Amino acid sequence: MIAARVKKILGLTRRDLSLLKGFGKVALASAVAGAVTFAGRAMLSETRPFPAFVVCGGIFSLAYLAGILLFRVFTRQEREAAHRQFIRIGRAISSRRATDPSLQMHSEI
């Protein structure tokens, strides 16, 4: 009902629906992550609130990430940009370890 009013007010046509495809995928990933988190929370019924909150946050985050990847929300260019960013961060961490003696691992026999 609300969708019909929004469609009428904005003057949307069927051609415009393809523009909302990404939004639908994000909504679906969120719904799936919410359902998984709800099931996880049910298993934590005896857990104190803060630990349950932290665990549920982790469950939601992982399930949402899996959904986003599974439903291919990101374009190829966005995935490539994220990959380049992860490589850049990895190199920065590696170079910091190489130059900072306190971060180097020591193995003593």
Image (tube, helix red, strand yellow):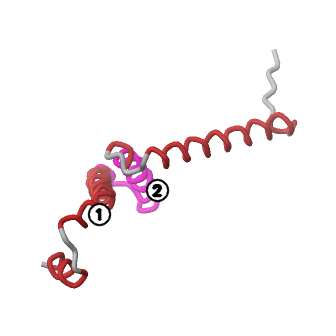
Crowding near the residue tagged with mark 1, few <14, some 14–19, many ≥20 C-alpha atoms within 10 Å: few
Which quarter of the figure has residue 51? bottom left
Residue at image location 46% in from the left, 61% down from the top: 50
Q: Is residue 83 left or right of residue 18?
A: right
The secondary structure that dominates the magenta segment is helix
- Callout 2: few (<14), some (14-19), or many (20+) C-alpha neighbours within 10 Å? few
Furthest toward the top, the residue is 109
* Vertical relation: 80 (above or below) 30: above
Rendered position, 49 above or below 102? below
- The stretch of residues the image draws in magenta is 42-67
Give the residue pinned by disc 1.
20
Q: Specify the amino acid type for callout 2.
A: Val
Q: Which mark is residue 54?
A: 2
Residue at 31% x, 53% y: name it.
29
Q: Residue furthest bottom?
A: 9
- Of the 4 image quadrants, the one containing the N terminus is bottom left
Question: Is 53 contained in the magenta span?
Answer: yes
Amino acid type of the residue tagged 1 in the rendering: Leu
Identify the residue at horizontal 30%, vertical 62% (top origin).
Answer: 19
Query: Which of 54 and 7 lies nearest the eye of the viewer?
Result: 7
Q: Quadrant of residue 109?
A: top right
Closer to us: 64 or 105: 64
Residue at the left extreme of this rendering: 1
Q: Residue at x 39, y 50 (%)?
A: 59
